Amino acid sequence: MWAFAGLLLTSALFVGKVIADRCPQICICDGIRRHVMCLNKNLSEVPISIPQVTQKLDLRGNEIKVIPAGTFLPIPYLTHLNLQKCKVGSVDEGAFRGLGRLVYLNLASNNIAFIYQEALDGLSSLQQLILENNRIEEIKPGAFGQLGFLSFLNLARNSLVYLPDMVFQGLQLIKWINLSHNTIHVIANEAFGGLPTLRRLSLDHNELQFLPTEALSKLSGTNRLELGHNPITYIGEEALEMASLKQLFLDNMALQDVSHTAFVRSPLLHTIDFHNNQLFLLQPLREMAHLKKINLTGNPVLCTCYMRPFKEWAEKARIHIDVACAGPVAFRGQQLESLRTIDMKCKRKGYEEELLATLPVQTRELEEDAPKCPQGCTCSPDFHHANCEGRQMQSIPKGFPSNTQLLDLRHNEFHSIPKISFPGLKNLTSLHLQNCKIAVLQPGAFQNLKNLVYLYLSNNSITSIDADVFEGNTQLAYLYLDHNGFIQMPKGAFSLLPSLFSLHLQHNSISQLSDRDLEGTGNLCWLYLTGNHITHVSVRAFRDAQMLEKLHLDENFLQEVPTRSLRELPNLIELKLSKNPIKNIGDGAFFPIARSLQHLYLDNMGLEKVSSGAFTGLGPKIKSLYLEKNKMHSLPTLHRFTALEVINLREIPFHCDCKLLPLHKWLEKLNLRVGATCGSPADVRGQKVKLRTTFQTCPTWSTKKVKRTSSAKAKVKKHSNKKRWSGNVQGKRSKKSKA
Ligand SMILES: *[C@@H]1O[C@H](CO)[C@@H](O)[C@H](O)[C@H]1NC(C)=O
Ligand SMILES: *[C@@H]1O[C@H](CO)[C@@H](O)[C@H](O)[C@H]1NC(C)=O
Ligand SMILES: *[C@@H]1O[C@H](CO)[C@@H](O)[C@H](O)[C@H]1NC(C)=O
Ligand SMILES: *[C@@H]1O[C@H](CO)[C@@H](O)[C@H](O)[C@H]1NC(C)=O
Ligand SMILES: *[C@@H]1O[C@H](CO)[C@@H](O)[C@H](O)[C@H]1NC(C)=O
């Protein structure tokens, strides 16, 4: 032991000398601390002569555009690596291999757009990963799967739009994830699954329009949540279900109302920060035993009788409220806490009138520095929102503040959207035109909307779209055309939309998908065609949409699985074919997508037969399989489906004779609720396929026993089983043919 320590000491001294000797000329080496710095040196690759024993390597400000596999193999003792501002665009598979001691990796301010799982291979001790300020648009579930020791992940200032299910899977010790300053709009319900140790989540400065209640409810250990600067207007009943949450930041949003039961399912809340919202009034928040602080500064709170219950509640519960009253005039600027409750009066008018009486003061104050807003609309300059919902407008109003980001024009009667209807709205990201009786979109209708990401045209009467309608909308990613009058795909309409990610065309009357119908959708990931009249999908229909991950073809008129068309979809993860009149599924029906498919919906189809090779190729990748409400009597063997999380076999009339034994045995071992019951024969109708008693008349051999017995014995046994078994089957068959 002592000898060993001595050896370490001498080798350390020796090594110090070696470092000094071998330091690359343009770097600075600190041999004692095993620290090498090569800052701002225009290096295009990691210098090869860095001393092997180096622990900290600082390469900030170079031009290392690509990090090839095995780059760091010569310096395996690294614990800290800084590659900030190196113009890194791609991190090859295995780039960091060999860095099993690395605890800190900084890749901030580079040009990274995708993170491939293999790129982070080998970083088995990593604790901090900083990817701030890159161009990451998408993270695939499992990308961080190897980082079991990571405690801090910084993804702030990227271009993330949505977070898919299980995206952070594998981060078993993660404490804090920073997702600030992205454009996150959608969070899948299971996105935060598998993060029991997460204490803090930063989601501020994103594009969330609603609290992602379900997704957040998975974070049972999180005690601090930052959600400020998202365009959320309302927090509904029981909207937040986070068992350990103590500090909640909801500042700088567009909040106009908060339900009094909003937080009852987050009983440990201690602090809520609402500063800079649009709240006039708050109700006492129910059942909040631990609440100590509410910050309402920067809200136009009216200290009238309607605020009394809130103030009394806060006083009684000793909750500190920070807010200065915005009205009535007599109290303007005074702290709510400094007022006496009995002085907070309402004139003898209704609440609405009271508000109205005070409102002009508000708007007058705002008007001085606020930009214009079209008549009949309301504009909130601080939040860059404009709202003209349901005003029976016949034409698109003009004159919105030029920095408007969200424009809500739902429920009007525009009939047609003329060319350049939205001049000067360069920063508009979200445009709502649902329910506006629109039949025609004229060429250039959305011209100049360079930053438009979300366009909602649901529930109108559009039947076709000319190729030049979307001229200039290069950022458009989410396009909603559902509930319109299309009888065919709006061919060519997408060729000017290079960023199109999600296309909603459900509930139209499209009757087929032909070649080139999807021209220009090279980046499309989600395609929704539920509830159309599709009878035919041409073999090349998806040729132009090879990135598709999600395809919903449910509620159409397909009579068979469009297997040959699926060949063009190498990335398909989810396929929905529910409610199509498909009677048979033949061999290899899903073979072309077997390598990527994870979720398959085949329910409610009137299926009569699933052939024995129907699922060929499918297996351990499949996570969910929906087969409920069909008419077949049996299923081919499913034992290759080893990773199922959901399987639904309800309301299938299984014929529970001994032929179904393999399915029974498989279900017996499966630890999932499947709901499979027998439809026949009559004596077992309604019984669970999973139950042993259902099959008690069948030979009850156990495969283990067969293996253990000598082959001769086994033969005899098998033989006699066969006899009993076939007798049984015949019996059932004759019954069936009678029926
Ligand atoms: C880096 O390279 C650029 C052009 O290649 C050059 O202009 C600049 O002077 C270089 N900087 C250093 C520090 O060598
Ligand atoms: C997360 O990252 C952002 C962007 O860099 C930074 O401003 C913020 O401070 C970080 N969040 C927290 C809570 O530190
Ligand atoms: C409330 O928020 C405002 C604005 O950020 C801040 O100045 C103030 O100190 C906060 N009050 C409390 C009690 O934290
Ligand atoms: C649009 O947004 C950018 C970035 O936030 C800002 O610099 C610019 O001033 C905005 N444009 C208008 C017209 O407000
Ligand atoms: C669609 O519009 C019709 C009439 O304009 C309305 O009755 C219906 O509720 C709307 N549907 C949806 C889903 O908004």
Image (cartoon, rainbow, N blue to C red):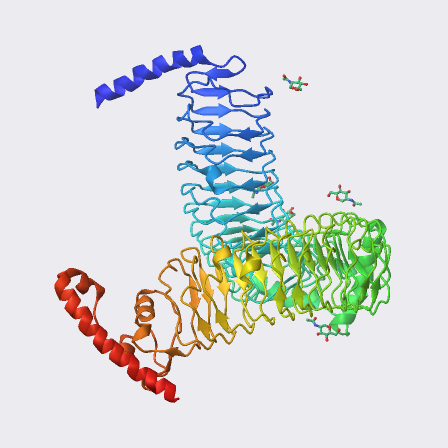
Q: Is residue 226 left or right of residue 378?
A: left
The quarter of the image holding the C terminus is bottom left
**Residue 272's image quarter?**
bottom right
Q: Position of residue 87 (x, y in %)?
A: 61, 30
Foreground pick, 186 / 1: 186
Pick the residue in front: 467 or 457.
Answer: 467
Q: Residue at x 37, y 59 (%)?
A: 640
**x, y (%) of residue 554?**
58, 68
Is residue 6 found left or right of 103 in the rendered image? Answer: left
> For residue 45, what is the image quadrant?
top right
Position of 297 relative to 309 (above/below): above
Q: Quick one: 109 or 465, which is closer to the camera?
A: 465
In-front residue for pair 72/562:
562
248 to 21, vertically: above or below: below
Question: Looking at the image, can residue 709 be seen?
Answer: no
Classify residue 357 as left or right of residue 262. Answer: right
x and y percent of residue 595 in the render? 47, 52
Task: Give the percent coordinates (x, y) of residue 368.
Answer: 85, 51
Whether residue 212 is situated above or below residue 309 in the rendered picture: above
Q: Is residue 302 visible?
A: yes
How many tags in the picture?
Answer: 0
Q: Quadrant of the N terminus?
A: top left
